[in-house]
Every structure is written in structure tokens, then in C-alpha cells.
């Protein structure tokens, strides 16, 4: 379902970088300090993460590339997550759905669905019951697996039911 991720000005990605995902399992590998965690942070951020701490920063402005000795800082951060919706899992009449978030040093931010301005709530509603959203378990951060495994069996079951998308049927 995840087709691509486009990152620009986000943390360690000053220039526009596009990562394509293909069917099957995707692994992001590389030496320490090369931006692997920033890729998962970018996904969480575009899906609406509001906690700078969860994104491994002190304040939200920390998601904007702050510059190096060789590169000047940039003025905004932008991430676009593109999903294949050919099976119409998302309740929207598009074969491909792009979700974009921009954040400016001024503190202003924008959300877009297929390049149309929207609210974070619109994105949350669009992704509801898909397992993809911010509260879904399609992205599990470091250390979270240990938390899940140390939970009671009932709590683990609830997590797996939510991740598989069967919670909506249990409620009915």
C-alpha cells in the first residue's frame, strides 16, 4: 500500500529525497548516523505526530534541517507519503493518495491530501480503521516492541487485533 516517501528539509535530508517502496517486506538498513530513524520519524510526522519528543527532538522546529558547516539551514520541512489506493482501502475516489505535511520556521504548518489543503483531522479520518494512522501499529519505534512483549496477554491481543484491523468488527 505504501508507494513512496518524499522528504525535503526534514532533519538530515536537506534536499528532496524520494524513497520508493515495493510489494513485500521493506527493510531500511545502513550504518549508524545515516538517517534510518529519520525516515521512520518522517512517516510518523507526516501522519500527524505532534510530540517533538517522540520525534527525538526538543521542539517541533527540530524537524527542519538546521544546517552543517557545508550547508545552510533550510526554511521549511516537507514530507509527502504516497499510498496505492487501487484496492480502494481508503474511502476516497483516487487510485493514488498523497498526504503532505509542511512546517515552517515561523511555526506555521500545512496539511494536504492530493495537494489540496486539509486539516489533520481529515487525514486521521481518512486513515481510520486501516492500521496505517498515527495510532496504528504499522510503525513500531525502537523500544516499543519490548513494551508490547512485557504487556499482559489481553493487552497484547488487543494490540494485534488493532493492527490487523479486526477491532472494528469486534465492536459491532
Image (cartoon, rainbow, N blue to C red):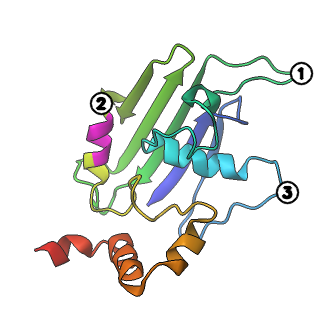
Find residue 130 and report its horizontal and vertical position in percent: 32, 62
Q: Residue farthest to the bottom?
A: 153
| Label disc, if present, on residue 78 of the rendered structure | none
The residues colored magenta run 120-124
Residue 8 placement, left or right of 33: left
**Residue 77 occupies which quadrant of the picture?**
top right
Residue 30 spot, x, y in % from top left: 80, 58
> Magenta part mainly helix, strand or loop?
helix
Mark 1 crowdedness (10 Å alpha carbons): few <14, some 14-19, many ≥20: few
24 up-or-down from 111: above or below: below
Q: CA distance from mark 1 to mark 3?
A: 22 Å
Quarter that holds the C terminus? bottom left
Looking at the image, which residue is at 27% across and 55% down?
128
Residue 69 position in % (x across, y down): 89, 21
On residue 31, the disc is 3
Marks 1/3 in contact by CB < 8 Å: the verdict is: no
Q: Residues within 10 Å of mark 3 (few under 14, many from 20)?
A: few
Q: Residue at x 55, y 37 (%)?
A: 52
Q: Which disc number belongs to residue 118?
A: 2
Magenta span includes 168: no
Q: Secondary structure at mark 1?
A: loop
> Does residue 148 lie above or below 79 as drawn?
below
Judge the density around disc 2: few (<14), some (14-19), many (≥20) Cα neighbours within 10 Å.
Answer: some
Q: CA distance from mark 2 to mark 3?
A: 37 Å
Image quadrant of residue 153?
Answer: bottom left
Specify the farthest residue to the left.
172
Q: Is residue 49 visible?
A: yes
Give how far across and how far down residue 133 sits, in percent.
Answer: 38, 54
The residue carrying mark 1 is 69
- 1 vs 2, front mark: 1
Name the residue at 84% across, 24% down. 68
Circle 2 SS class: strand
Amino acid at each position: 500500500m505504501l508507494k513512496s516517501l518524499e522528504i525535503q528539509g526534514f532533519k538530515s535530508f536537506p534536499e528532496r529525497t524520494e524513497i520508493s517502496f515495493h510489494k513485500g517486506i521493506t527493510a531500511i538498513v545502513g550504518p549508524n548516523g545515516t538517517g534510518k530513524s529519520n525516515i521512520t520519524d518522517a512517516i510518523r510526522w507526516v501522519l500527524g505526530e505532534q510530540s517533538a519528543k517522540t520525534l527525538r527532538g526538543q521542539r517541533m522546529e527540530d524537524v527542519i534541517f538546521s544546517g552543517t558547516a557545508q550547508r545552510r539551514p533550510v526554511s521549511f520541512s516537507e514530507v509527502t507519503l504516497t499510498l496505492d489506493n487501487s484496492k480502494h482501502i481508503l474511502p476516497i475516489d483516487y487510485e493514488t493518495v498523497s498526504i503532505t505535511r509542511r512546517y515552517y520556521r515561523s511555526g506555521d504548518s500545512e496539511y494536504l491530501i492530493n495537494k489540496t489543503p486539509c486539516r489533520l483531522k481529515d487525514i486521521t479520518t481518512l486513515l481510520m480503521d486501516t492500521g496505517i494512522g498515527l495510532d496504528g501499529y504499522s510503525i513500531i519505534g525502537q523500544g516499543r516492541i519490548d513494551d508490547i512483549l512485557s504487556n499482559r496477554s489481553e493487552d497484547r491481543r488487543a494490540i494485534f487485533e488493532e493492527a490487523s484491523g479486526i477491532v472494528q468488527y469486534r465492536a459491532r
